[in-house]
Image: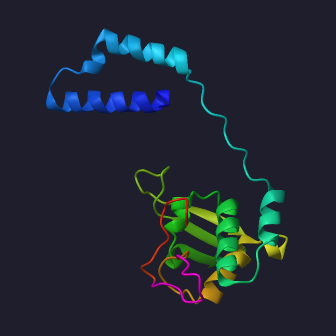
Amino acid sequence: MAVATIARRLAAVAHEHRQTGVASPCDDPLVRETMAGIRRTLGVAPRARKRPVSTADLRAAVHAMGDRLIDIRDRAILLVGYAGGFRRSELVGLDVADIEERPEGLVVTIRRSKRDQQQKGREVALVYGEDPETCPVRALRAWLERAGITHGPVFRRSTGTATWPSAACRPSRSPWW
């Protein structure tokens, strides 16, 4: 296990003991010394961060997509997510009611977010792109129009055909959707 995993599990044990009013074994010097040894042996340097997607990579991915309904959806997800800096969970949580048309483009309201724990919400402007093929506004409009989505979730799970599930069916927040 990684050092962070062990430390997180120790924190959970300590928390449970505090909640029940029992002395925590995590406060024992032997446990502390053992954790210090684990840190020295395994190291605690964070893993290298992944390289962010470049504009050229995004453009290449979008150009490689076809005209199938699933391609139109995926193009919209990539371009809107990139332009708005959205997390996967924010994209999944978008409803048609969260999108406001403006002459300059769209204003997207994010109602729930990992970075907004009080759920105040935030608005993100998506403006027209110079290249129509990589424009997030055009891609989102094309998706909504082609899929016939007028209410409910913006991005819906694909069934592999042109038939789309009901408005109540959102894609999961797992990375495999």
Q: Is residue 101 above or below residue 59?
A: below
The percent coordinates of residue 72 (x first, y second) are 69, 79
Residue positioned 76% across, 79% down in the render? 66
Q: In the figure, residue 100 lies in which quadrant?
A: bottom right
Q: On the picture, is 71 further left or further right than 149?
A: right
* In-front residue for pair 155/129: 155
Magenta-colored span: 157-166
Q: Is residue 14 above or below residue 64?
A: above
Q: Is residue 35 above or below residue 71?
A: above
Residue positioned 42% across, 79% down in the render? 168
The percent coordinates of residue 6 (x first, y second) are 41, 29
The percent coordinates of residue 11 (x first, y second) are 34, 29
* Residue 48 colored in magenta in the image: no
* In-front residue for pair 25/152: 25
* Residue 165 colored in magenta in the image: yes
Q: In the figure, residue 7 lies in which quadrant?
A: top left
* In-front residue for pair 56/141: 56
Residue positioned 59% across, 86% down in the render? 161
Residue positioned 60% across, 30% down in the render? 46
Q: Can residue 149 be seen in this view?
A: yes
Furthest residue to the left? 21
Q: How is the image coloured?
A: rainbow
Q: On the picture, is 49 further left or further right than 56?
A: left
The percent coordinates of residue 8 (x first, y second) are 39, 32
